[in-house]
Image: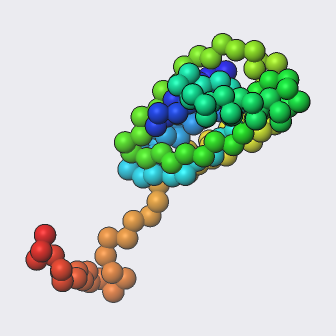
C-alpha cells in the first residue's frame, strides 16, 4: 500500500495504482498538459485532519459496518507543475486489498492507457492545405 500526498491532502491506494498514477502525472508534465484523474483509495485516518478527519473515519467505519476503512474515489487535477509524493504505508488495510483488487486493476488499466496516449506521436499540420500560411496579428500590439 502507498500513501500519496498531493496539494496538502493524502490518500492510501495500492502499489499498482500509485505507480500508474505517478507515471501519468510525469507524462502530463512532459507533455505540458493537465488532466482530471480519478483513482480508488482507502479512507483512513488523517494526521492533520482534525474534526474533518475524525468525521471521515467515522463515516468510513459506518459504511463497512464498523469494520475498518472504506473505499472512495479520489478526484484530482494534475498538470506540468504538479508535485506528488508516494510513500510506503504500513497499515491493517492489507486485508482489504483483495476486495479492492477489481477497482484497482480497472484504475491501473485506465491510467496506463492515458499515459500511453500521451506518448503516441500525433500528426502536426505546418501549412495550409493550399500551401499558404496566414496569420492574424490583430490584438498583438498590446502585448
User: Horizontally, is 102 left or right of 78 in the view?
Assistant: right
Residue at coordinates 70% horizontally, 14% vertically from top-left?
A: 91
Residue at coordinates 46% horizontally, 60% vertically from top-left?
A: 122
- Residue 117 horizontal/vertical position (percent): 55, 51
- Please state, as top left, top right, bottom left or bottom right, where the C terminus lies in the image: bottom left
| Residue in the foreground of this view, choosing between 112 and 40 | 40
Report the residue that reaches farthest toward the right.
65
- Please state, as top left, top right, bottom left or bottom right, where the N terminus lies in the image: top right
- Residue 33 seen in the figure: yes
User: Horizontally, is 132 left or right of 16 in the view?
Assistant: left
- Residue 113 horizontal/vertical position (percent): 63, 47
| Residue in the foreground of this view, choosing between 106 and 121 | 106
| Image height of 80 relative to 126, above or below | above
- Residue 109 seen in the figure: no
User: Horizontally, is 64 left or right of 113 in the view?
Assistant: right
Residue at coordinates 77% horizontally, 39% vertically from top-left?
A: 103
Instruction: Please identify the quarter of the rendering in which residue 64 is found.
Output: top right
- Residue 51 horizontal/vertical position (percent): 61, 31
Amino acid at each position: 500500500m502507498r500513501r500519496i500526498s498531493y496539494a496538502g491532502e493524502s490518500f492510501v491506494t495500492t502499489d499498482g495504482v500509485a505507480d500508474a498514477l505517478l507515471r501519468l502525472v510525469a507524462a502530463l508534465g512532459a507533455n505540458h498538459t493537465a488532466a482530471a484523474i480519478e483513482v480508488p483509495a482507502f479512507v483512513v485516518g488523517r494526521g492533520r485532519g482534525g474534526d474533518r478527519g475524525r468525521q471521515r473515519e467515522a463515516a468510513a467505519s459506518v459504511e463497512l459496518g464498523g469494520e475498518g476503512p472504506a473505499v472512495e474515489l479520489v478526484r484530482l487535477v494534475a498538470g506540468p507543475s504538479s508535485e506528488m509524493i508516494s510513500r510506503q504505508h504500513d497499515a491493517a488495510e492489507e486485508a482489504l486489498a483483495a476486495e479492492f483488487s477489481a477497482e484497482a486493476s480497472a484504475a491501473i488499466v485506465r491510467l496506463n492507457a492515458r499515459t500511453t496516449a500521451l506518448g503516441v506521436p500525433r500528426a502536426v499540420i505546418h501549412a495550409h492545405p493550399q500551401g499558404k500560411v496566414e496569420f492574424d496579428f490583430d490584438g498583438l500590439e498590446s502585448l
